[in-house]
Image (tube, rainbow, N blue to C red):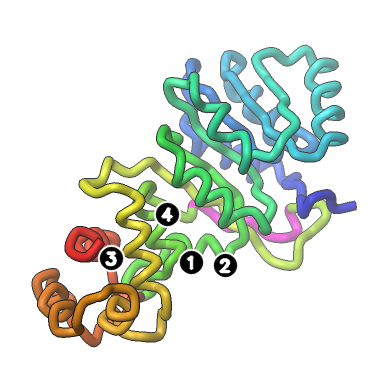
Amino acid sequence: MIRLGQHFLTDKNALKKIVALLDLKESDTVIEIGPGHGELTEELRFKNKDLRIIAIEKDELLANDLRSKIYDLGIKNVDIITGDALKILKSLIINLKSYKIVGNIPYYITGKLLRTIGELEKKPEVSVLTIQKEVAERLTANPPKMNRLAASVQFWAKPEIAFIISRNDFNPAPEIDSATIVLKKAAPRKIEAGTYYEAVRAVFAQPRKTILNNLFASLKISKNEIEVGLRKADIGPASRPQNLSVENIIELASLYF
C-alpha cells in the first residue's frame, strides 16, 4: 500500500550512489526526509558510524517501525522524529552549525519542500533529493528554457542532475522515472531574497508574454520607463522570461523592486 504518496527506493546501487553524493565527514549531521523503511538510513550508517542522522517521517506507523528496527540493530546517533518536514525543519536546524539534507521525496511535496528550504535562514551545505524526473529537468533548466521553479531555486543553490532512477527500482513502482539531484549552497547574493522572489513572480506571471508586458502589469510606471531599465540591463524589451538568467533577474529586482 502507498502511504502518503511514498514509493520506497530499494535498489542498493542507487542508495550507495546517493550517499556518496553527500560527501560525508565524521562530524556531519544529515537530515533525512521520509526515511520510510530505513533503506537509506541503513546505508548512511554503514558509510559512517559516527554520523548524526535526524530522520523525519510523517507516517506514524513507519516511524515506529523504523525506531524498532534501529533499536534492534543497535544503531546509535539516529533520531527518528514523527512529523511533517515542511513544518518542523526550521526549528530542527536552529542549534545545528551545519547540516546536509537527503531524501526520496514524495512527488506531491517537492515544490513545497524546495520553497521551505529556500526560506531557511541557515541553508543546508548540500541537499541530495530524489524527485520526479520531469521536475528535476525543470529545476536545472537554463536560458532559453528558464522557468519560475528554476529561477527560484537557483537563487540559493546550484542544482545538478546526478543520475536517473528507473521506476522499476521502487516499491511500489511509480508511473514515471525519477532523478537524483544535488543542490549545493550558492554564495550569498547581493540582494534580499524577498526582493528577488518578488521580481520572479512578476517576470514569470505570464511566461508567454514579453518581460516588458509582465513588468508593466506589475509596476505602476510607464512602458517607456521600463524599456529604459531593460536596456540598461542589456535585456531586449521583446525578450521573454525563459531567456533570463538568475543574474538578469537580480538586476531587474535591483532596478524595480
- SS for dot 1: helix
Q: Which residue is mark 3?
A: 245
Q: CA distance from mark 1 to mark 2?
A: 6 Å
Name which residue lies at 35% across and 67% down.
142
Q: Which residue is most to the right?
A: 1
Q: Earlier in the sequence, mark 1 or mark 3?
A: 1
Q: Which residue is mark 1?
A: 138
**Front: mark 4 or 2:** 4
Q: CA distance from mark 1 to mark 4?
A: 11 Å
Please state the extent of the stretch shown in magenta in the rendering: 162-169
Q: Amino acid at mark 3?
A: Ser
Q: Amino acid at mark 4?
A: Val
Q: CA distance from mark 1 to mark 3?
A: 14 Å
Q: Are marks 1 and 2 in contact (CB under 8 Å)?
A: yes
Magenta-colored stretch includes residue 163: yes
Horizontally, is 172 left or right of 147 in the view? right
Q: Which residue is mark 2?
A: 134
Horizontally, is 5 left or right of 31 in the view? right
